[in-house]
Image (tube, rainbow, N blue to C red):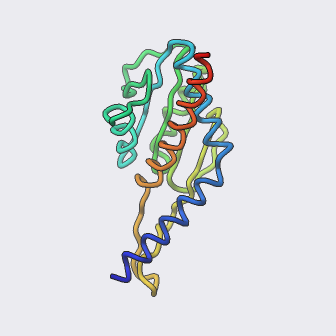
């Protein structure tokens, strides 16, 4: 099936683009690791299909340490960190409140966006999807796949940081 080959090639290209944000991914890992080191909590605020990342982080075989799902009634301290995962604008209200309260947080958006509110921000830039037909007539929007890929990179980096910290 030709579309499958195109899809695989496009995903590989997308993952390589995410790999190009290594420094930002490392900054996210460092920010989240701060919560673990200070015995705080990593609150995951995932919106829409980005809840796939929260599911992996909370219920996966290797859960994110000190992680919990963010809820509107969550009470945060200075030891806590928040990781907002959104398709585009869904996390903006929370980002504004966290910024106003001086709670450190990272934000990942699947589509193109700019903001200066989070300590660390990553936009994956998946606005029009990826073409899976030679004519470009068919696109797939792999927002959750891309976010999961970025999450696993962050988790690996964070695990490495925490292992170094324990010595």
The residue lying toward the viewer, choosing from 64 and 119, is: 64
Left or right of 56 in this view: 26: right
Residue 60's place in the image compared with 141, above or below, is above
The residue closer to the viewer here, 88 or 29, is 29
- Name the image quarter holding residue 71: top left
At 43% from the left and 33% from the top, the residue drawn is 45
Name the residue furthest front. Answer: 167
Quadrant containing the N terminus in the rendered view? bottom left
Residue at (64% x, 50% y) in the render: 21
Report the number of numbered marks: 0
61 in relation to 39, above or below:
below
Q: Is residue 86 above or below residue 160?
A: below
For residue 33, which quarter of the picture? top right
Q: Quadrant of the C terminus?
A: top right
Find residue 60 and report its horizontal and vertical position in percent: 33, 36
**In the image, residue 149 lies at what x, y percent?**
47, 50
Indicate the position of residue 113 as horizontal and vertical percent values.
59, 52
Q: Indicate the position of residue 105 as horizontal and vertical percent values.
A: 57, 29
**Is 26 left or right of 70, judged from the image as shown?**
right
Residue at horizontal 58 percent and vertical 60 percent from the top: 16
Residue at position x 45%, y 87% in the image:
135
- Which of the 4 quarters of the picture holds residue 34? top right
- Classify residue 141 as left or right of residue 98: left
């Amino acid at each position: 099936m030709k579309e499958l080959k195109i899809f695989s090639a496009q995903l590989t290209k997308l993952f390589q683009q995410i790999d190009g944000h290594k420094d930002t991914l490392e900054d996210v890992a460092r920010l989240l690791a701060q919560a673990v080191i200070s015995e705080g909590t990593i609150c995951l605020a995932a919106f829409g299909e980005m809840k796939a990342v929260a599911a992996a982080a909370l219920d996966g075989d290797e859960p994110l340490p000190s992680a919990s799902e963010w809820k509107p009634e969550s009470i945060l301290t200075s030891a806590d960190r928040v990781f907002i995962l959104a398709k585009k604008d869904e996390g903006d209200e929370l980002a504004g409140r966290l910024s106003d309260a001086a709670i450190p947080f990272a934000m990942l958006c699947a589509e193109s966006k700019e903001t200066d509110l989070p300590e660390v921000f990553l936009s994956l830039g998946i606005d029009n999807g990826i073409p899976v037909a030679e004519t470009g007539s068919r696109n797939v929007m792999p927002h959750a796949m891309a976010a999961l890929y970025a999450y696993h990179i962050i988790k690996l980096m964070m695990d490495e940081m925490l292992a170094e910290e324990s010595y």
